């Protein structure tokens, strides 16, 4: 009996695998495993074992296990690459929003300053108009 204990990731519990070479298992079951890995190159596909040799069956099983693991890792990489693309797109969008915010803040500051100037000019002109209105009747009276 061969027993192996392995921790897949730090946050998961240990997985214990045990099998015996003396057990007779149907090799045809194992042959079907290689068909479950379509993205594995032909030259890397597990070759069916020589059923009469225990070592051949053991190597075949290990190869199938590694091929499955390879497939899972490849899938995880694909998922992570998709997530990376989405995050990069969000980052670009956030940067564009930040640039737009800076532009709008600058435009707001400019408009506030322009508004102050216009209010000042308006106040000055209103005072001038009032002064002119007060001085106008005197001019008419003097003429």
Image: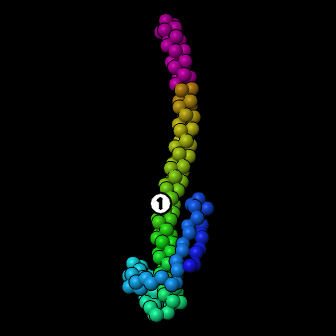
Q: Give the percent coordinates (x, y) of residue 98.
A: 54, 49
Q: Is residue 48 left or right of residue 88?
A: left
Colour option used = rainbow
Residue furthest toward the top? 141
Tell me which residue sits at (44%, 91%) in the image. Answer: 51
Is 25 or 136 nearer to us in this picture? 25
Q: Quadrant of residue 12?
A: bottom right
Is 107 or 76 nearer to us in this picture? 76
**The stretch drawn in magenta includes residue 129:** yes
Tell me which residue sits at (56%, 79%) in the image. Answer: 1
**Where does label 1 land, which residue?**
86
Tell me which residue sits at (52%, 87%) in the image. Answer: 59
Query: Is 63 situated above or below 69?
Result: below
Q: Which residues are magenta?
A: 121-143
Query: Is 95 situated above or below 52?
Result: above
For the question of whether residue 70 can be seen, the reply is no
The secondary structure making up most of the magenta span is helix
Is 133 or 108 nearer to us in this picture? 108
Q: Give the percent coordinates (x, y) of residue 113.
A: 57, 34
Query: Is 98 situated above or below 113?
Result: below
Is 70 or 87 nearer to us in this picture? 70
Q: Give the percent coordinates (x, y) of residue 80.
A: 50, 65
Q: Is residue 52 left or right of residue 112?
A: left
For the question of whether residue 12 can be seen, the reply is yes
Residue at disc 1, secondary structure: helix
Q: Quadrant of residue 31?
A: bottom left
**The stretch drawn in magenta includes residue 122:** yes
Query: Is 58 situated above or below 135?
Result: below
Q: Give the percent coordinates (x, y) of residue 107.
A: 53, 42
């Amino acid at each position: 009996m061969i027993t192996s204990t392995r921790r897949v990731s730090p946050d998961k519990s240990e997985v214990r695998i045990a099998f015996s070479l003396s057990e007779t298992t149907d090799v045809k079951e194992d042959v079907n495993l290689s068909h479950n890995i379509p993205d594995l190159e032909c030259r890397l596909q597990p070759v069916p074992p020589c059923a009469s040799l225990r070592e051949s069956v053991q190597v075949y099983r290990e190869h199938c296990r590694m091929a499955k693991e390879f497939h899972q890792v490849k899938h995880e990489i694909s998922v992570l690459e998709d997530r990376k693309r989405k995050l990069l797109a969000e980052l670009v969008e956030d940067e564009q929003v930040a640039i737009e915010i800076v532009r709008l803040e600058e435009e707001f500051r400019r408009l506030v300053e322009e508004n102050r100037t216009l209010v000042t000019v308006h106040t000055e002109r209103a005072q001038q108009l009032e002064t002119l209105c007060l001085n106008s009747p005197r001019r008419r009276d003097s003429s």
